[in-house]
Every structure is written in structure tokens, then in C-alpha cells.
Amino acid sequence: MADDLIAVKTEIAAKAHVNTDRHRAMTEAAAKDPEGFWREQSGRVAWMKAPTKIKSVDFTGDVSIRWYEDGVLNASVSCLDRHLDTRGDQVAIIWEGDDPNSDVKVTYRDLHARVCRLANGLRELGVKKGDRVCIYLPMIVEAAVAMLACARVGAIHSIVFGGFSADSLASRIQDSECSVLITADEGRRGGRKVPLKTNADDALATCPSIRHVIVAKNTGGSVPMQAGRDVMWDDLCAKQPATCEPEPMGAEDPLFILYTSGSTGKPKGVLHTTGGYMVWASYTHELVFDYRPGEIYWCTADVGWVTGHTYIVYGPLANGATTLMFEGVPNYPSVSRFWEVVDKHQVNIFYTAPTAIRSLMRDGEAPVKKTSRASLRILGSVGEPINPEAWLWYYRVVGDERCPIVDTWWQTETGGILISPLPGAVAQKPGSATLPLPGVFPALVDGEGKVLDGATEGNLVLLDSWPGQMRTIYGDHARFGQTYFSTFKGMYFTGDGARRDKDGYYWITGRVDDVINVSGHRMGTAEIESALVAHPKVAEAAVVGMPHDLKGQGIYCYVTLKSGEEPTDALRKELVAWVRKEIGPIASPDAIQWAPGLPKTRSGKIMRRILRKIAANETDGLGDTSTLADPGVVQELIENRVR
Ligand code: 6R9
């Protein structure tokens, strides 16, 4: 792997919130006096009553995690009210539609009024502190308004990604017994319409807890409305006052639930609370993106994922930023879309996922190079390991070698970024998430939970809490302890494996359930994928273990070629030789299957569980494929399995 350091850029360091010296000082302070450090950082949010108790954490026994527990606040006040005097007329949200000719700008003052109107509407419908409200919306401004309106009245929002099916929506509503659903007539993505209200109606047939449905008008498509249950957003809000008393919330009162899949069982309702989460969102957004007032910041995630929660809505708005919300997709109407939007809105900070970068790489440099991108200052990556090849393309082609890349490692469970370079402080290595943020204490442990020192590889754990950590699985605290704290006693287990190099840099190798063992050699599938993707003809690759008589496990590779490349036997041999050369003979692929498409979740994560089954020829029990973006690719892969 490329271990070359890319030095901190002096022009970034000169003005950065955190330079190398400050990074060191903060890291030391947070380790020496965590109470003092986090007391100081708590000043980032607007408290109705400032906390005097800072931290109370026990990772053993029943597991109890509390931060700022006697503080009182309301998240919507931190995101809106406190900015009105200083930046009421500043744009809070730039909305860019799927259609390149549609955009909208919403100031902090407008956003505050819209949130207050909906909050009053929710109260009129009987929503009280602690009630659960499900949000099933496309990427429109109403999604942010709905989140903040729930926060304003103390309701716990549970967002379900607009690409999820009626069944997935129903099971999430049932699990947390939501009383209100906020949706829209239809969504729009890549020129196509998504029938949200119709899906919602299907889901609600099995959701007796829902008393009211609020329907935002988006496409204007006609949708059935059920009298007594359904109300149009505009009708509900038109009559409401533009101010609304915020509900005083204890720091440990829940802010939201977000469902995420684990390696077993049903999706878990990850629960985040108010005070610690808000401090974490603000702290990490400012430090990692080096956010400065006046800058335009764009995270391409969907609010249906945790990245959208923390880095489109709560973090940026808490910091008074201008945050861009994008309804569309990277390749519509053309593969230049991202960069055209960057130029159109003069985006300074751009945060996306490796899967998007890799797919755009397939089309070469020209669609990028025809745009200016001169406004860009910092680039970010999140969601999966970014292979050095994609990292370097992002760095050279998109950022013109001018913009540092922050490769941010974190999880739904962690609430916000834990491991990432700070652009003014940490030299980068392509493919490494580098160092923990000040106040984060990762470690690598062996299979028995023994902490390993120095340059090594192991299971990634966190030895102590941070304010943004999840507090429980909604309705199942026992499962919380079982899932995260029982594998290694007294530590939070991430489920990821990582390598740490001689400079203390972390290289996330992927979920440990993706680790394969070939003839006693442990290998990260991400490592082999990264080698494959480094080949000039390969666009994307997914690697899984398969049963092998001699070696225990063999290496099975699914390879998507770049447009125009021919899948030949000669190329297959070339790729085997290539991987042997890149990693070593132990990493010699046993099978390479040409894959026109890979089974991905709608958030772009490859579903390796399915690929492992196909490789193992266990295609009878493929399990739930309902969360796939395109279930059709699975059949294609089964038919062309390599024997
Ligand atoms: C934020 C988010 C979490 C899992 C995580 C890890 C992978 C995320 C990564 C990364 C390597 C990064 N992951 N960021 N792996 N480098 N920068 O994606 O949350 O959807 O819960 O996924 O994603 O495997 O454990 P979530």
C-alpha cells in the first residue's frame, strides 16, 4: 500500500482552527483532563441550563453512558434561534434539485419560521415530548424542517431512507411505535419519480400506532388522502404562528432513532440523545472540515443515513454554516453533475463516498476537467475504506492536488467522526483514515481482547466514551450490551478490523466479518479489492472468502470492468498476476467472476453476505434482499458463477 506522506499544506495550516501544535495540545488535554476538556467543548451548543456533571460512563455490567446529564437544551435552538441575531439573513440551506434548473435558498430566519410552524402543527396533532415521529421524505428542504420541528417539540424522529420499501418502512414504524408519519407525494431521483405516499399507504396497513400522516407537496402528483388521518403539510402549517416555544430537553433525552443493519437479526434502532450528540456534531464538523463562517459546505449523503443527520443538518446548522442539500444523483443528467453543482454554488467543502468516486472514475477525467472546481478547499470521504487508487484520483483529478482529503471513519453508532485527519494538522496517506480526533481513544485488540501495541493489526475498539456515542438500542438495552460490549469486556467493539502503521496511522481494513483466512494468512478483502481496482481496466471489485479444500478459504473476486473493456481469459490471467504482484502470492485470486453490477444497498454499500453465498454456491438461502438498490443483479451473478 502507498505509505507516502502528503504533507499538511501550509496555506491551509496557516488559517486552520487546528494546526499540528494545537492538535497535539488538544489530544493531550483531552487525555489528561477529559472533564475539563469536554466541559469547555460543551460551550459549542446553546444551553438553557449549562451542565455541571460532564461524564458518567460504565462500559461494564448493564452499560450506562451519560454526558452532560444535568444540562438542559433544545437542539433546534442551537441550530436556529441563536443564529438569528448574527446571521438571520445568511443562507442556511441551499437546495439543489434533481432537475439542474431548480434550486432554492433558505435563510436562517426563513428556516426558523418554517420549523416553528411545523412544530406548532405537530403539537396541534397531539405530539408531545418523547413521542416518536417517522420521517419518510426525499432530499427536500422539508426533511430538515421536519427533523428540527420534531426536536423543537421534544419528539424523537426516526428517519427511514426514501429508497426503502413499504415493508422496511412498516417494520421500523412498528418497532418504535411512531404516532405520526411525515412523507411527501413523490420523490425524484435521476429523472425518475419515487412513489413515497403510495409506499407509505401500503406500510400503514400494518402500522396501527400511526394516528396522523403529514404529506408535503413535492412533485404535485395526485395521491389519495385518507380523511381524518392524512393532512397536507401546507394546510397544517398555513394557520400556525411563525414562533414556537422550544421544549426544554434534558441532555440525555433522546433526539433521534436511526435503524441500521448488523451482522445478525433485524435492523437495530440506534438511539442518540441530545446534549452529547449536538456537542459532537458541532465539534467534528468544525474541526474535520475546518469550517469557516461564510463557506459553502456540501455533503452528498441522504438524510436517511447518519451522515445526513450529522453532516447535512445538525453539525453544519449548529455551526451556522451554509449547507447544500442535493436531491439528485452523481450521474444525472450527466456524469459532470457533482462538479457542475460545485461551480454553480461555489462549494468550498465537498464530502462524498468512495463508491461515488469509483463510479465516476470509470468515465475518465474529461467530465471533471471541463469544470472549474476552483472554489473547492477541502474534500471528504466516508462510508467505506477508500482504496489508494480512488483516493489519488479524487486528490489529483477532482482536487487538482490543492485540497486535502479527509477520510473520515465512523459509524451510525458513533454519532459522528472518530478517526480522520484534520486538514491543517495531520499529514495524509492515501487510503488511511490517519489519527483519532482529540478525545477519542481507539485501540487494536487480538481475539482475546488483549490490547496490542505499536505497528500491528487487530480488532478496532474504543476504550472510552465520547459525547456522541449511541446510548442504547431502542427498546432493547440488553441487545445493546450484547452487540457492542460483550465481545471484548469493558470496550466498545466497532465490528471493524484495522491496521496501525509505525506512525500510529489507522488503516481500516473493513468489517471483521469480511476478513478471510487463506492458508492461515489473514487478509482484508478491502486490500485485495484495492489491488484489483488499481488495475487500469477495473472499475470496481468485491472480494469474499469461499470454501476451499486445501487452503481453508479461497479468494473469490467479483470484478466490474470500465466501460469499453472486454472480459477475456487473458485479462482474467492478467488480473490474477496483478494481485499476486500487488499484495503477494498468498493473495492469488482463486476465482474471478465478471460482474456487470454488484449488489449494493441503497446507500451504496456492497452486500458481501450475498456475494459470499453465491461464491459458496449456497444460493438457496440468500436471505433478505429487499434492501438492495437493484435486486436484478443477484440473479445475473448466480447464473454466471465461476465453478
Ligand atoms: C458513517 C457510516 C459504518 C461502517 C464502519 C466501516 C465503514 C465508514 C469508513 C468506513 C473505512 C471509512 N466505514 N467510514 N470504513 N473508512 N472512512 O458510514 O456509518 O453506515 O453505520 O457504516 O462503514 O465498516 O463500521 P454506517
Image (cartoon, helix red, strand yellow):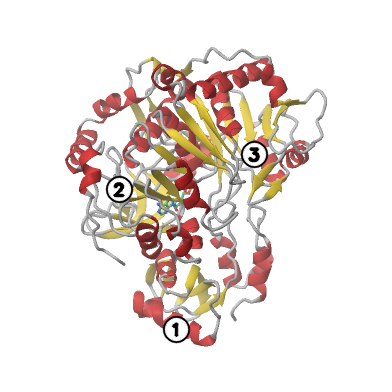
Figure check: 209 above or below 407: above
Secondary structure beneath label 1: helix
Q: Position of residue 369 (x, y in %)?
A: 43, 60
The residues bearing labels 2 and 1 have C-alpha atoms spaced at a distance of 36 Å
Secondary structure beneath label 3: helix
The answer to whether any part of residue 273 appears in the image is no
Figure check: 525 above or below 222: below
Q: Which mark is residue 172?
A: 3
Q: Position of residue 49 (x, y in %)?
A: 39, 13
Q: Quadrant of the C terminus?
A: bottom right
Q: Residue at x 25, y 39 (%)?
A: 16
The residues bearing labels 3 and 1 have C-alpha atoms spaced at a distance of 47 Å
- Closer to the camera in the image, 550 or 109: 109
Mark 2 sits on what residue?
421
**Side of 237 relative to 130 (left or right):** right
Secondary structure beneath label 2: loop
Q: Is mark 1 within 8 Å of ligand 1?
A: no
The residues bearing labels 3 and 2 have C-alpha atoms spaced at a distance of 35 Å
Q: Which mark is residue 574?
A: 1
Q: Residue furthest bottom?
A: 570
CB within 8 Å, label 3 to label 1: no
**Side of 169 relative to 564 (left or right):** right
Q: Position of residue 450 (x, y in %)?
A: 30, 53
Figure check: 332 above or below 411: below
Kind of residue at disc 1: Glu
Q: Which mark is residue 42?
A: none
Kind of residue at disc 2: Pro
Badge 3 or badge 2: first in the primary sequence: 3
**Side of 455 relative to 496 (left or right):** left
**How many numbered callouts?**
3
- At label 3, counting other C-alpha atoms closer than 10 Å, the crowd grade (few under 14, some 14-19, many 20 or more) is many
